[in-house]
Image: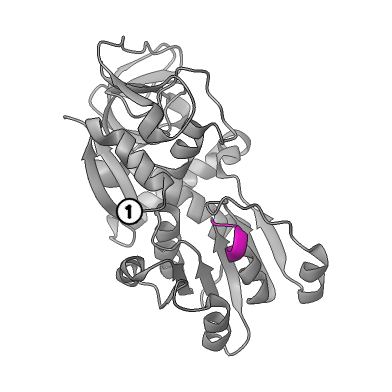
Amino acid sequence: MRAWQVDELGEPREVMRLRDGLPLPAPGPGQLLVRVRAAAVNFPDALMVRGQYQVRPPLPFTPGVELCGTVERTGAEVGGWSAGERVIGNPVLPGGAFAEYALLDAAAAFRAPQALDDAEAAALHIGYQTAWFALHRRAALRPGETLLVHAAAGGVGSAAVQLGRASGARVIAVVGGAEKAAVARELGADLVVDRTAEDFVTVVKEATGGRGADVVFDPVGGDAYTGSTRCVAFEGRIVVVGFAAGQIPAPALNHALVKNYAILGLHWGLYNTHDPQAVRATHEQLTELAEQGVVRPLVSARLPLGEAAAGVQQVADGRSTGRVVILLDT
């Protein structure tokens, strides 16, 4: 089979290599061998290739943490799956999704929503699960509240905008640049702030009559987090999802005390270990929302397998909107 491999850590365009003639992985007990149809590029892919992610697979490894494919065959002790069924999930590293075949743990595999094509289905799992758990499990977002979403035109940010709207919240989207602002408006944000032209703190305060945002969804860190503490509402909740800016804030806890807001962390992957039933229940709800047309992953680019390194670099450099998806011959 063909697969991208990383032999040394560095920038994706420099260290990712497309190789042919590699052996197909063999499914072990409880695993599915999946023929990959589409693989969504995630920011963690870039971090993993650079050696900056908390998960560090042994070299060489194939990047790609999210896919949609069809079941080729099952390992021992697997029930409920048949060859040809469409499936989404996170591949078993070190054999990632940027390959023609990959392995999934059957217990953590999910049926792809029929309402979504392969590229959209590949982009559903991580981004929308993360946004759902952030907004509902951690922040307990309520209808009528104001939700502030940073990096709102990105993969996980765009999911938060759609799910925020679906929950009845008023969504204020923060983006960087006019092109991304247009994307956020198309996603349905009630108010869009281009941080390159406006101060989002001032805009949020004006838009809420000085009250501030009830919930902040922050996958950026750095100045985005610092500014959020200045415009979060009384009893507001800031959900820390990631640090795409490359700067990890050091929160002033006395400030949280004085303003009476909560700082909540979200590492969605831990739910797969600590509460897998919640992950499965969320998938069912997301599937229903997809069937209703309420949520649909924003796929901004569909690239062939041969351009996967360029796609990962594009996401690493912050030049993408929504999801970049690698498509394989089907």
Question: Furthest-left residue in view?
Answer: 330
User: Quadrant location of the C terminus?
Assistant: top left
Q: Is residue 137 left or right of residue 296?
A: right
Image point 47% across, 74% down: which residue? 172
- Span colored in magenta: 220-224
**In percent of the image, x 49 and y 27: which residue is there?**
9
Left or right of 121 in this view: 214: right
Tell me where residue 218 appears, x and y as whole percent. 56, 60
Image point (54%, 60%), residue name: 135
Q: Which residue is mark 1?
A: 297
Instruction: Report whether 81 appears left or right of 221.
Output: left
Residue 222 sits inside the magenta stretch: yes
SS at badge 1: loop
Residue 76 highlighted magenta (yes or no): no
Please determine whether, in this image, residue 49 is positioned above or below residue 135.
above
| Majority secondary structure in the magenta region | helix
In the rendering, at what x and y percent does residue 117 appear? 22, 45
Residue 113 visible within the image = no
Nearest the viewer among 177 and 29 is: 177
* Rendered location of residue 41, percent (x, y): 37, 41
Which residue is outermost to the front?
A: 14
Vertical position of residue 128 compared to residue 28: above or below? below
Residue type for callout 1: Pro
Residue 208 found in image quarter? bottom right
Colour basis: one colour
